[in-house]
Image: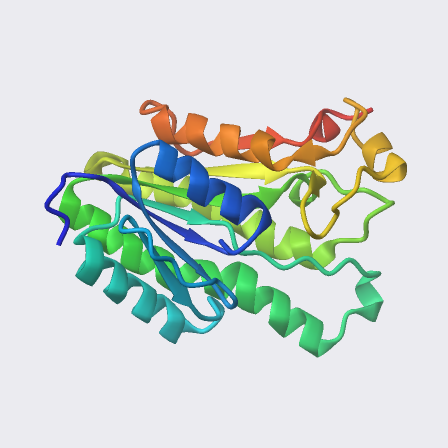
Amino acid sequence: MNESGKKVAVITGASQGIGAGLVGAYRKLGHRVVATSRSIPDSDAPDVLTVRGDIADPATAERLAAETVERFGRIDTLVNNAGLFIGKPFTEYSQEDYEAIVGVNLTGFFRITQLAVGQMLHNGGGHVVQITTSLAEHASSAEPSVLAALTKGGLESATKSLAIEYAAHGIRSNAVALGIIRTPMHPEEDPELARRHPLGRMGEVEDVVEAVLYLETASFVTGVTLRVDGGRSAGH
């Protein structure tokens, strides 16, 4: 049980890139951290618990929540960072593509968020953050992305619904919608990708971390989608 009074953050998709950056950031913020992904390595840090599993499988969510409460006694923050993007023309998506994207982006959000919010109700408050994409509301001819819009757009709508449903319980819900971020998926600064952002560069993991931490500490902010996309959503 959490006898130290430290808050506990659960971060999905935490083995690399944005997720790994968030793990480090929440540790610096003083939180205990539970990090999950299919390939997350073990951690011997006393304030870090790693749980391997596919978040698209509801059984992973059940195990993740149970191990978090058993080890640390509570959940204060959930960052739904795990996500899958497959960019194809709409008519070229396969059933397998559809099931994979919906599995990670929607099913992966659904059960762990239910369980986390249940713990937050018990604790008297908390914060849920969804990582989405600016393509959900601002389509680009250069990036076919119907399934991203379907799933991540759904998360943005769910973010608002959660915010209103649980505001009276001290639980906030927000989202961060991204442009193209330099991660292991896009490890190098690509001039073509950079030009898709009015600021003229790709985003960095630190840009996303700063946005999430702002929302974490902004106690009067709920139901918003903070666009960290280099100006893409404002247009060119």
**Residue beneath the point at 72% across and 24% down:** 234
Q: Is residue 156 visible?
A: no
**Figure quadrant of the N terminus:** bottom left
Q: Residue at x 81, y 25 (%)?
A: 200
Q: Residue at x 22, y 47 (%)?
A: 120
Q: Taking 35 as reference, is 7 above or below it? A: above
Which is nearer the eye, 187 or 212? Answer: 187
Percent x, y for residue 219? 31, 25
Please report the residue visible at 30 percent of the width from the left and 39 percent of the height from the top: 31
Question: What percent of the width, then of the height, locates residue 166?
Answer: 27, 42
Q: Is residue 16 visible?
A: yes
Q: Nearer the viewer, residue 125 or 209?
A: 209
Q: Quadrant location of residue 226? A: top right
Answer left or right for 199 relative to 66. Answer: right
Judge left or right: residue 145 versus residue 103: right
Q: Position of residue 90 (x, y in %)?
A: 80, 62
Of residue 220 and residue 11, the one placed in the foreground of this image is 11
Position of residue 68 relative to residue 96, above or below, is above
- Vertical order, 23 against 91 (above or below): above
Quadrant where the C terminus sits is top right
Among the 4 quarters of the image, the one containing residue 104: bottom right
